[in-house]
């Protein structure tokens, strides 16, 4: 079918979206497609858009092919692989003018079902599979590999690369290997014989991937917990965090088996609910084992009482929050950064908690291990604030690193020898001026070091007390401890615009790839911004100084109520007018187009205002 | 008051146990509970049992929830670490602590408010998992600390101090525990030290979750006529199915009752439980008949006490999870961190 406008022509820079029915076996075929392009040295950034369901509903896999390495979601689709009749209309609408629609034309559709500015590519996949296979399950499953084969010719993807990947996937299952290679070839043969190829979109080998790895954030976080010495994990299944606990299980089965005995150097309990999960983590942390739980927003809500107990009783606890759309049950399979305030101030009374904001799987690994150290050092809950976009999608990122000389920071723990030698022990006594007291593990010494742990007010020696002065000493020491945390947490990453500017932007977490792309695009348009990527709360002084150095700071985040902006205003006492909220919160990952559009409009609007005589023009 | 120091003097001829401790070494602070409270008797029984079992006092972790009963860990084992957690959630904290170091004795003290209402879920799952602990519910049928509201174990038709009638059907934690597969289920009465102390000893020796429902009258709010958890009512309706003695390994068992009237149960550590039958035909090794007996007698208004069920061969949570012998809280990077070579291989597999 001939398109009314020129078809898009792009090498290594386009978006392919697969529209499938979930439970149909499409996920591994689509991943094969993405990995093949990666192996050709071209960066890809795939995203799962999946329903809150197990089988039968629509699911999409959106792959951005990006030689320039822009890993954020672009927005818009150049090639739609429309394998789900249910979503045909919506899928068709999403294609860029001049884009392509690939479909199974075993039953050809009338012209009215298409657009005249979209090129249609039909391959009779069902017919091909029915001819090649008799088993109904095979007929269904191999459809996916057939279309990967077809696409590989259409987009000029290296056949050898795809076959090598299939070989790796089915290394131990030779019959499946042959069947998959055959299915791939069926797709390739049809296109080679019947269709013009390659199309305007194509892949060309490059060398832009480097030594980067391709991994999802949840697996990376789990691996970080293994490396960081977690021995106890208590969790409750909830989308999108379950795969983190399951990955921890798988890694422990590989790496935490005692060689001589075959016994486990770990304990994982799938608890009856999130309250029991966090309770077990509190108990384990109290008794000197590194423990963590992984959950999402609704789990955090349930855990808040225990979080308050851990804060007041000063117990090391690590919580991985893979954020999703809220509030309440919200959007379980969509991403947001909407738990900032509920985590920063979790629980009743005056509380403040350490939050870490990883931007990608590499930082998920690093920050998970760091969280376990920080929990022990600060004797308090540490939240690692991931989200669905990072956690459940494979992302290209820097390889994991570990220094074998690194030891765990167990924090201030008084030993039996120190107690025996007569060293003074006050469980809630500030001895070093940093607000952090010494603790003892249970059963350390027969006659010294024992104390009662409670969430109630106490004196510096853990004796129950209702005296106002004891209470004040304690809660003010907790503030001092929080202040000490500023230098210990991951520091912000600041980038200069390259020329003086009074405009800046602050962002964090999964916004980062879209932000880098947006900064580049705006620069080309003459809009220059200094940037600061937050990596933790409490905010180090550098953050306050950065804001003070600019007239206007755009705070970009993925929630409705500008939570991070509120946190900044609250913590620094800044005039709210200085911080401009840029909010994206429909559950899809934020795009560079969005950021560019929103910031440019506001900067543009500002530019139109008359400049007063005594003010320097902003850039 | 817990801030009044206890006198350190004791009688020079006070007996010492095998770890050279007197009973005083197992005590805690002075109780602030009401005079005559059943819970204080239970604390005394815990002290007696730990002393007789030669437990090293600091190798105990005592955890509780919130309530009058949950205050009691302060009043025994003053040299061990204690944890007063949050209402109804002691089992999860204890489970986590146990996972970190399975070598300690874990005493979980709770009440009927703490464990049969807000905490019923955690009680249920602790029984299911078989975490190695002594789980004592100090059961008085009311919320004492908040001044006398009914708890979920209050019998239907029983009255509060102010004359309000409870219309809800009661939760019987013993029946519930049996149904859930608990491997050690007992009931006793704070006023019967002869029965209670051996039961606590047996619970300490048991590997798994040992549940003791101890009726413990609240003199302030639930000791009046109309209460089914008062001293008078319990004494009149107590039906003990057996009396037990815990005999350590290698000690000769002195049989002082007629043949056919006792059962001997060997525990996993070689110690023996000698159960003298008080009720003919009661078999504490048969879960179903135990459930039947308890329910039948209950329907007659009787409170069945004694060691109601025990499985001496049960495994605990550590065994289910196949954990290594060394406590997790002693391990470091050398044992736990796979290292950079493994990480490089991981990186390669992700390219």
Image (cartoon, rainbow, N blue to C red):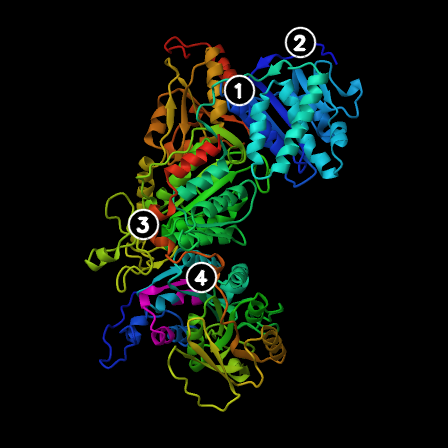
Residue indicated by mark 2: A6
Chain letter for mark 3, please: A
User: Mark 3 or mark 1, which is nearer to you?
Assistant: 1
Residue indicated by mark 3: A474
Q: Which of marks 3 and 1 is nearer the N terminus?
A: 1
Residue A564 in percent (x, y) is at 45, 32
> For mark 3, does the 10 Å Cα neighbourhood hold few (<14), some (14 to 19), or many (20 or more) residues?
many
Mark 3 to mark 1: distance in Å? 53 Å
Q: Which of marks 1 and 2 is nearer the N terminus?
A: 2
Mark 2 vs mark 3: same chain?
A: yes
User: Mark 1 or mark 4, which is nearer to you?
Assistant: 1
Mark number displayed over residue A66:
1
Secondary structure of the residue carrying numbered label 2: loop
Residue A366 in percent (x, y) is at 40, 36
Q: Which of B132 and B119 is in front in this view?
A: B132
Q: Which residue is located at x 41 percent, y 54 percent?
A: A284
Q: Is residue B345 above or below residue A597?
A: below
Q: What stretch is highlighted in magenta?
A: B47-72
> For mark 4, does the 10 Å Cα neighbourhood hold few (<14), some (14 to 19), or many (20 or more) residues?
many
Quadrant containing the N terminus of chain B is bottom left
Q: Which of B127 and B65 is in front in this view?
A: B127
Q: Which residue is located at x 22 percent, y 55 percent?
A: A418
Mark 1 vs mark 2: same chain?
A: yes
In the figure, is residue A487 to the left or right of A323? left
Q: Which of A599 and A491 is in front in this view?
A: A491
Mark number displayed over residue B23:
none
Q: Which residue is located at x 38 percent, y 26 percent?
A: A493
């Amino acid at each position: 079918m001939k398109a009314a406008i020129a078809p898009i022509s792009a090498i290594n820079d386009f978006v392919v979206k697969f529209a499938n029915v979930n439970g149909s076996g499409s996920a591994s075929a689509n991943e094969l497609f993405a990995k093949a392009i990666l192996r050709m040295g071209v960066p890809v950034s795939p995203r799962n858009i999946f329903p809150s369901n197990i089988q039968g509903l629509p699911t999409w896999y959106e792959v951005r092919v990006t030689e320039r390495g822009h890993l954020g979601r672009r927005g818009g689709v150049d090639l739609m692989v429309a394998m789900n009749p249910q979503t045909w209309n919506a899928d068709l609408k999403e294609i860029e003018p001049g884009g392509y629609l690939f479909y199974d034309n075993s039953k050809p559709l009338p012209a009215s079902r298409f657009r005249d500015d979209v090129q249609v590519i039909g391959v009779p996949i069902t017919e091909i599979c029915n001819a090649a296979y008799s088993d109904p399950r095979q007929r269904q499953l191999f459809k996916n590999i057939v279309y990967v084969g077809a696409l590989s010719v259409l987009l000029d993807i290296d056949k050898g690369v795809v076959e090598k990947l299939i070989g790796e996937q089915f290394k131990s299952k030779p019959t499946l290997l042959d069947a998959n290679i055959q299915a791939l070839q069926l797709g390739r043969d049809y296109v080679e014989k019947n269709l013009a190829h390659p199309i305007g979109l194509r892949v060309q080998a490059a060398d832009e991937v480097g030594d980067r790895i391709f991994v999802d954030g949840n697996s990376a976080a789990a691996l970080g917990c293994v490396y960081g010495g977690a021995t106890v994990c208590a969790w409750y299944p909830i989308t999108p965090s379950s795969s983190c606990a399951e990955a921890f299980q798988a890694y422990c089965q590989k790496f935490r088996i005692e060689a001589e005995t075959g016994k486990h150097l770990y304990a994982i309990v799938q608890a009856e609910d999130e309250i029991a999960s966090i309770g077990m983590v509190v108990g384990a942390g109290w008794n000197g084992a590194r423990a963590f739980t992984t959950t999402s927003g609704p789990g955090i809500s349930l855990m808040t009482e225990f979080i308050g107990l851990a804060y007041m009783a000063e117990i090391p606890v690590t919580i991985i929050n893979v954020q999703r759309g809220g509030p309440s049950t919200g959007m379980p399979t969509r991403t947001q950064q909407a738990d900032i305030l509920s985590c920063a101030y979790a629980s009743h009374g005056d509380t403040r908690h350490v939050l870490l904001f990883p931007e990608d799987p590499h930082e998920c690994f690093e920050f998970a291990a760091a969280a376990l150290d920080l929990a022990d050092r600060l004797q308090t809950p540490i939240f690692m604030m991931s989200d669905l976009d990072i956690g459940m999608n494979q992302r290209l990122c820097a390889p994991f690193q570990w220094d074998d000389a690194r030891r765990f920071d167990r924090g201030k723990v008084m030993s039996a020898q120190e107690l025996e030698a007569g060293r003074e022990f006050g469980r809630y006594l500030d001895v070093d001026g940093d607000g952090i007291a010494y603790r003892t593990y249970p059963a350390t010494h027969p006659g010294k070091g024992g104390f009662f742990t409670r969430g109630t007010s106490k004196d510096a020696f853990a004796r129950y007390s209702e005296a106002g002065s004891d209470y004040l000493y304690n809660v003010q020491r907790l503030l001092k401890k929080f202040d000490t945390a500023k230098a210990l947490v991951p520091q912000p990453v600041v980038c200069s615009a390259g020329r003086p500017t009074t405009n800046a932007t602050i962002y964090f977490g999964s916004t980062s790839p879209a932000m880098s792309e947006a900064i580049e695009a705006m620069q080309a348009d003459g809009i220059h911004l200094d940037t600061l990527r937050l990596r933790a709360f409490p905010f180090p002084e550098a953050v306050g100084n950065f804001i003070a150095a600019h007239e206007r700071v755009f705070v970009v985040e993925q929630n409705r109520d500008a939570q991070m902006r509120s946190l900044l205003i609250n913590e620094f006492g800044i005039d709210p007018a200085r911080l401009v909220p840029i909010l994206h919160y429909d559950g899809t990952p934020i795009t560079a187009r969005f950021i560019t559009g929103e910031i440019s409009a506001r900067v543009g609007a500002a530019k139109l205002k008359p400049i007063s005589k005594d003010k320097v023009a902003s850039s | 008051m817990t801030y009044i120091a206890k006198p350190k003097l004791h009688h020079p001829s006070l007996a010492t146990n095998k770890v050279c401790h007197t009973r005083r070494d197992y005590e805690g602070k002075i109780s602030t509970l009401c005079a005559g409270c059943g819970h204080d008797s239970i604390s005394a029984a815990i002290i007696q049992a730990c002393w007789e079992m030669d437990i090293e006092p600091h190798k105990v972790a005592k955890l509780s929830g919130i309530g009058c009963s949950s205050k009691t860990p302060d009043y025994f084992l003053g040299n061990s670490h204690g944890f007063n957690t949050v209402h109804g959630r002691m089992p999860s904290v204890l489970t986590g602590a146990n996972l970190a170091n399975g070598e300690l004795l874990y005493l979980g003290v709770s009440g009927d408010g703490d464990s049969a209402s807000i905490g019923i879920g955690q009680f249920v799952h602790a029984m299911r998992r078989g975490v190695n602990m002594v789980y004592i519910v100090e059961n008085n049928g009311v919320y004492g600390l908040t001044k006398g509201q009914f708890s979920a174990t209050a019998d239907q038709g029983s009255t509060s101090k102010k004359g309000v009638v409870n219309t809800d059907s009661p939760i019987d934690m013993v029946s519930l525990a049996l149904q859930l597969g608990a491997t050690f289920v007992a009931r006793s009465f704070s006023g019967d030290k002869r029965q209670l102390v051996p039961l606590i000893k047996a619970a300490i020796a048991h590997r798994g979750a040992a549940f003791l429902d101890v009726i413990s009258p609240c003199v302030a709010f639930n000791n009046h006529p109309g209460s089914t958890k008062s001293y008078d009512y319990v004494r009149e309706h107590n039906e003990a199915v057996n009396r037990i003695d815990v005999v350590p390994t290698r000690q000769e068992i002195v049989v002082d009752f007629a043949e056919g009237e006792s059962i001997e149960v060997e525990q996993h550590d070689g110690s023996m439980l000698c159960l003298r039958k008080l009720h003919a035909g009661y078999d504490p090794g048969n879960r179903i008949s135990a459930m039947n007996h308890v329910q039948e007698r209950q329907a007659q208004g009787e409170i069945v006490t004694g060691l109601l069920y025990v499985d001496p061969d049960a495994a605990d949570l550590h065994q289910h999870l196949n954990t290594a012998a060394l406590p997790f809280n002693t391990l470091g990077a050398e044992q736990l961190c796979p290292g950079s070579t493994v990480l490089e291989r991981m990186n390669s597999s992700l390219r």
